[in-house]
Image: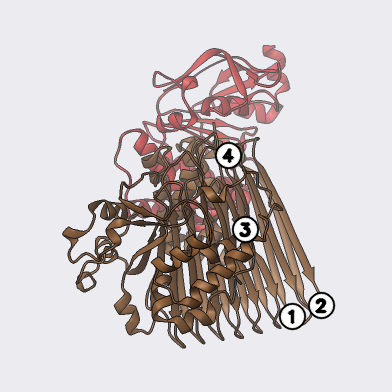
Amino acid sequence: MVALDKAETDVRDGVDRETVEAVNAMAGKYKHGWETDIETEYAPKGLSEDIVRLISEKNGEPEWMTDWRLQAYRRWLQLDEPRWAMLHYPEIDYQDQYYYAKPKSMSGKPKSLDEVDPKLLATYAKLGIPLKEQMILAGVDGAEAAPAEGRRVAVDAVFDSVSVGTTFKAELMKAGVIFMPISEAIREYPDLVKKYLGSVVPASDNYFATLNSAVFSDGSFVYIPEGVRCPMELSTYFRINAENTGQFERTLIIAEKGSYVSYLEGCTAPKRDIAQLHAAVVEIVIMEDAEVKYSTVQNWYPGDEEGRGGIYNFVTKRADCRGDRSKVMWTQVETGSAITWKYPSCILRGDDSQGEFYSIAIANNMQQADTGTKMIHLGKNTRSRIVSKGISAGKAQNTYRGLVSVHPKAKNSRNYTQCDSLLIGDKCGAHTVPYIEVKNNSSRVEHEATTSKVDDDQLFYCRSRGMDEEEAVALVVNGFCKEVLQALPMEFAMEAQSLVAISLEGSVG
Amino acid sequence: MLEIKNLHVKLEEEDKVILKGVNLTVETGKVHAIMGPNGSGKSTLSYVLSGRDGYTVTAGSAKLDGQELLEMEPEARAAAGLFLAFQYPVEIPGVGNMTFLRTAVNAQRKARGEEEMSAGEFLKVIREQAKTLKIDADMLKRPVNVGFSGGEKKRNEILQMAMLEPKMCILDETDSGLDVDAMKLVAEGVNALRSEGRSFLVITHYQRLLDHIKPDVVHIMADGRIVKTGGPELALEVENNGYADILAEVL
């Protein structure tokens, strides 16, 4: 750890300062709490076979896909919502939601920037998407040819239920990488989708994943062919805009033998008094010697201080390390949502495969988070590492729930789990629920856990050097999270640091 | 510079009175030392001046260049030019020493309405200052005080002092836990910072630190009051005869 610190400090020095600036600049506001007034086309409220058929039809899907959805829907009807998590929320009325909403301006592709709904462009600008990418996202002809400024990250933006555009598609295609909305992939690459969709998270997996399988309207599809190192980072921005609308996106990533990709996911939503439902599924298939890094900065609207509104975030994310020596790394910064129910998992099927999970979960005010991971060791010599940093403030409840399961054939496997909780104030809670099952005697599992409070001495020390209380808290908490922040790609690390600071505002004093 | 008048302080949670009317004036550019037996209130005085929670001021005032310190937040006192070198510097895991210092320097500058220090300038200045204190690059990158030896922690406090350029420095038992060489190094660091516009209040148990940091005035504190004030010879008297004689004389 010390070695890492040395290597990273030079780069990170500037970042902490940015955090502090960000806190000051944004003083107490949920940064992404604006709503874009865009004409939206809705499917009727509620859920039925007809709605499922309608979503499928809107996406121009083949019959097999419609049948797949319908099967999932029928299965869902027989399932009960899980209640084992340490989460308390009012009954969700699944018939009182819209399952499909689409910005009207996306119905026909614009030919130039003038034809694009300026409000949609403004939305992208607020999300911090560079102009060239905004043009591409808006589908403007020739935009891809324009020179890019600054960073090169391919972006897929999902607005309410619909992918509104993907950047750098052509350039990625040259490398053989397919990065497109999953709705398009279903039409253009039906064989690939058919082969892998539901192969990691089956349609019948759990209540929320099954619901997603029935009604998902879009999401991202990524295919990295054998031996290809994806030439740029891929990124998806999800945003819920329309009211009373559930967002159900589906992401499918396939990394063939010896390939590599780093994938980033960012989420925001406007402020609403009424809770909104979000149930996503991410499936990752990783073949021999391939590696996937999946990073999330989740900043859905968390609700207000009294717990009104906010996103109910029920997400199933799973990576299947199918090939020998394959590797997956999940990194998540969870600062938003009123309710978080999320356990990105690794199935370590191939021999010598590796799974890593780095997590920062922050719950402030009335937020509740029940999050963690599952490491399923099936192959020989498989290794997993879990580093979880939970921060609770206000009246929030934060639970780490993690499973490490080592199967009989997973000889010589190893797991290391470090699970740290930090409490700010005396009205919040931190809970750690580890499940460990080891079914052979050559494997080794280590679990370390700590719980601490933000120390008054630390805060006074910072303040006596001139920092105000919020700067001091941000600094101490970012220090607490450092190991995880270091696991994020640079650009996300900066965003995450400021998010950490912002989401803890008002938590002291 | 610093003017403390009739300062009465009790613990916030208990009815224990610690300071019972402290009067003390430190002139600009002077070095004052406070000596005294355990429990006389020396450390409490330093904490109250810098604004730590847990104390209630029941009477009196403490002004820095005419500004009432006791009404200010700790960070405002720092921005006004007050610095406390801690007896027990606090560890902040995961936060690089350099990051910490730059955040502090710029927070103070911002509070005073000054331009922030650029990364390049900061790096240049900190490297120079670190050299004087024999602080290597590695120590600048390590998390604040984590795994530092006693000597490293105290040197790090002096480095912070050098970077923050305060006008009133309080050193709370900076010599405690240091061997002779480490103490010399710290004292050299302090002496290098002595200037016409900067005052020091050096709190210590022992004369030996004052061999290296020569004070202009020495105060003896006992039972929450300054009971005797004199020149450097007063410290020698304590060293030779202990506190008993002086206390017997004044109480």
- Distance Cα–Cα, label 2 vs label 4: 42 Å
Q: Which residue is mark 2?
A: A440
The structure residue drawn at horizontal position 62% and vertical position 67%, both measured from the top left corner, is: A345
Question: What scheme was used to colour the molecule?
Answer: by chain
The structure residue drawn at horizontal position 68% and vertical position 52%, both measured from the top left corner, is: A85
- Distance Cα–Cα, label 4 vs label 3: 21 Å
As helix, strand or loop, the secondary structure at mark 4 comes to loop
Q: Amino acid at mark 1?
A: Ala
Figure check: A56 above or below A240: below
Residue B119 rendering spot, x and y as whole percentages = 34, 53
Q: Which chain is brown?
A: A
Q: Is residue A444 left or right of residue B155?
A: right
The structure residue drawn at horizontal position 55% and vertical position 70%, both measured from the top left corner, is: A329
Q: Amino acid at mark 4?
A: Met
Mark 2 and mark 4 lie on one chain; the one further toward the N terminus is 4
Q: The numbered mark 3 sits on a residue in which chain?
A: A
- Distance Cα–Cα, label 4 vs label 1: 41 Å
Figure check: B170 above or below A40: above
Q: Which residue is mark 3?
A: A388
Tell me if I can see residue A1 in this picture.
Answer: no
Q: The numbered mark 2 sits on a residue in which chain?
A: A
From the image, state whether disc 1 or disc 3 is nearer to you: 1
Mark 4 and mark 3 lie on one chain; the one further toward the N terminus is 4
As helix, strand or loop, the secondary structure at mark 1 comes to loop
